[in-house]
Image (tube, helix red, strand yellow):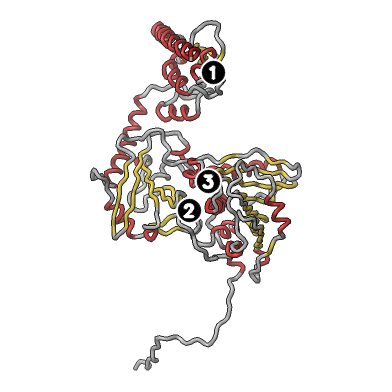
């Protein structure tokens, strides 16, 4: 016989309560998926939410060692009645529409993933001056240290290298006792560490915040302060690294947008196909183009997730030109989940239905797009075998022009590049081919007419230089110029010099 069952009760009784604060060591586990570049991106997100237009990331070096790191911004600052909630781990607050914050953990998790001490110093747009500090070694009672206002003001008024004043406030986040810093004071090893770390920071921030940077709404700079010599080194500015920033599409029918609808949700898939064999860093991205094919999720213009198909396709080298931009709005936020580090988006079951139903006005669907991307890749490989190899462009060419040429033209391996430079000629010829110096010279007398007045710069006149390169590049190849080559050069010289003289005369009359 079985034992008699006790009576089930719906209500559960209680006999009192007690406070169980979290173990201080739990904080040490916060943000363990962060790397230094993702942790700093989280702090920059806070600056963007505070309407900052400039952010400076500063490494501090003393006695040869790296000691601290600052993130300073010129945003609205933190008001006196909000700084305590901002420093509360998991503190709840209302996030405005478009805010990059979400969990109330970002700044703390990012900071404690890299350092044992977090100090926040701020002056609000209304003039409130506040400072708070957490240190992992003194969290047994979860009491946050208050920073004296005179020290807060001193730190805020350091020379941060801002070019604009922002909204009148200022916030400085300071990390000390940083676990990821090299502990040596050997100059070469410290410099090697800084070079590698700063490169990772520039690449990551340039990618995930490329929309803010490209619009001019945000400037981010990284520098190093040597306190022993009281100097701050040159700033490295973060440049936008747009994963969709090609010069021209790899397929004439793209980009195009497919829209999916399911269960009251609507989602747009902006489908792009890169040109084949691109050498742009926007295409090659850390990890390489094969790994970076697929879906790019954005929330409030911030890139959260770069690459992978989440079940829509199987990663394949033949799909490396395919990238899809997806903006997650508040209307569809429930279809996705985001990790606290904001480095990964996980799709829910409804996402597959949205993608399956997605189509444009012409009836194009996701499988059609994937086939087009694969075909574009195959055509680009065939075309690369057919085109004549050329000598690479060198000094004097605009970087964008050099990249565009590299995207289209296979180069002769092991050959020196062709430079293009200005000098004053004795005669009126527009250009001269100097095979010995591997230089295409342009007559400086026409420079004001070509560049629109003034002296220009090293990489000026990109249109004229690009056309001349395409015309005369083959004159630099081979052992000597044949009769046909000489005749072509004479023809181009006559026509282009006449055009240059005409343009120069027009400029003189105007």
Q: Earlier in the sequence, mark 3 or mark 2?
A: 3
SS state under label 3: helix
Task: Where is residue 226? Give x, y as percent.
Answer: 71, 43
Q: Please state the horizontal and vertical placement of residue 189, each as a whole percent of the image.
A: 67, 43
**Residue 248 visible in the current orientation:** yes
State the separation of the CA atoms marked 1 and 2: 45 Å
Question: Does 53 appear above or below 506?
Answer: below
Mark closest to the chain's N terminus, 1 or 2: 2
The residue that label 2 is drawn on is: 343
On the image, numbered disc 1 is attached to which residue?
A: 421
Pinpoint residue 191: horizontal percent, then vertical percent: 66, 41
Query: Are the two marked residues, 3 and 2, in contact with CB atoms closer than 8 angstroms?
Result: no
> For the residues carrying marks 3 and 2, which lies nearer the camera in this image?
3
* Residue at left offset 36%, top offset 44%: 316
Q: In 3D space, how far apart are the residues under numbered discs 1 and 3 (Cα atoms)? A: 35 Å
Mark 3 to mark 2: distance in Å? Answer: 12 Å
Packing grade of label 1 (10 A; few <14, some 14-19, many >=20) is: some
In-image side of 148 versus 392 (left or right): right
Other-residue count near label 3 (Cα within 10 Å), few / some / many at <14 / 14–19 / ≥20: many
Mark 1 in CB contact with mark 3 (< 8 angstroms): no
The earlier-in-sequence mark between 1 and 3 is 3
- Residue 472, position as x, y percentages in the image: 44, 15
Q: Looking at the image, can residue 435 be seen?
A: no
Which numbered disc covers residue 205? Answer: 3
Q: Residue at x 58, y 67 (%)?
A: 26
Element assignment for label 1: strand
Tag shown at residue 187? none
């Amino acid at each position: 016989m079985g034992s008699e069952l006790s009576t089930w009760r719906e209500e559960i009784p209680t006999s009192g309560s007690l406070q169980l604060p979290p173990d201080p060591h739990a904080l040490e586990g916060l943000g363990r998926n962060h790397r230094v570049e993702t942790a700093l991106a989280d702090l920059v997100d806070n600056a963007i939410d505070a309407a900052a237009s400039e952010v400076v990331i500063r490494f501090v070096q003393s006695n040869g060692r790296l000691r601290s790191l600052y993130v300073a911004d010129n945003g609205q600052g933190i008001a006196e009645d909000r700084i305590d909630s901002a420093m509360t781990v998991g503190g709840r607050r209302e996030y405005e529409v478009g805010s990059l914050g979400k969990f109330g953990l970002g700044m703390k998790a990012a900071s404690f993933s890299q350092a044992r001490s977090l100090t926040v110093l701020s002056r609000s747009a209304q003039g409130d001056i506040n400072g708070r500090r957490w240190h992992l070694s003194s969290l047994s009672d979860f009491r946050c240290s208050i920073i004296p206002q005179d020290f807060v003001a001193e730190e805020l008024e350091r020379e941060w290298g801002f070019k604009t004043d922002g909204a009148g406030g200022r916030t400085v986040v300071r990390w000390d006792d940083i676990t990821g810093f090299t502990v040596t004071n050997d100059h070469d090893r410290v410099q090697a560490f800084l070079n590698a770390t700063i490169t990772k920071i520039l690449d990551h921030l340039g990618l995930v915040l490329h929309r803010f940077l490209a619009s001019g709404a945000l400037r981010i700079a990284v520098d190093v302060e040597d306190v022993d010599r009281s100097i701050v080194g040159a700033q490295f500015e973060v440049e936008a690294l747009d994963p969709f920033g090609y010069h021209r599409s790899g397929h004439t029918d793209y980009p195009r947008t497919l829209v999916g609808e399911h269960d009251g949700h609507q989602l747009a898939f902006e489908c792009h196909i890169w040109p084949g064999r691109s050498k742009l860093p926007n295409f090659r991205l850390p990890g390489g183009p094969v790994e970076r094919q697929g879906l790019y999720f954005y929330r409030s213009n911030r890139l959260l997730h770069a690459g992978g198909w989440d079940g829509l396709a199987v990663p394949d080298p033949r799909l490396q030109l395919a990238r899809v931009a997806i903006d997650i709005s508040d209307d569809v936020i429930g279809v996705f989940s985001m990790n606290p580090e904001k480095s990964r988006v996980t799709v829910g079951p409804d996402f597959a239905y949205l993608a399956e139903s997605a189509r444009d006005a012409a009836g194009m669907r996701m499988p059609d797009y994937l086939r087009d991307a694969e075909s574009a890749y195959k055509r680009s490989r065939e075309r690369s075998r057919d085109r004549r190899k050329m000598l690479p462009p060198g000094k004097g060419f605009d970087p964008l022009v050099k990249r565009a040429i590299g995207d289209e033209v296979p180069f002769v391996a092991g050959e020196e590049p062709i430079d293009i430079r200005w000098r004053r000629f004795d005669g009126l010829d527009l250009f001269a081919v100097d095979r010995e110096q591997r230089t295409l010279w342009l007559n400086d007398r026409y420079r004001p007419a070509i560049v629109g007045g003034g002296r220009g710069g090293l990489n000026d006149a990109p249109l004229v230089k690009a056309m001349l390169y395409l015309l005369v590049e083959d004159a630099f190849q081979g052992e000597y110029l044949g009769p046909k080559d000489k005749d072509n050069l004479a023809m181009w010289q006559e026509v282009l010099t006449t055009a240059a003289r005409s343009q120069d005369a027009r400029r003189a009359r105007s």
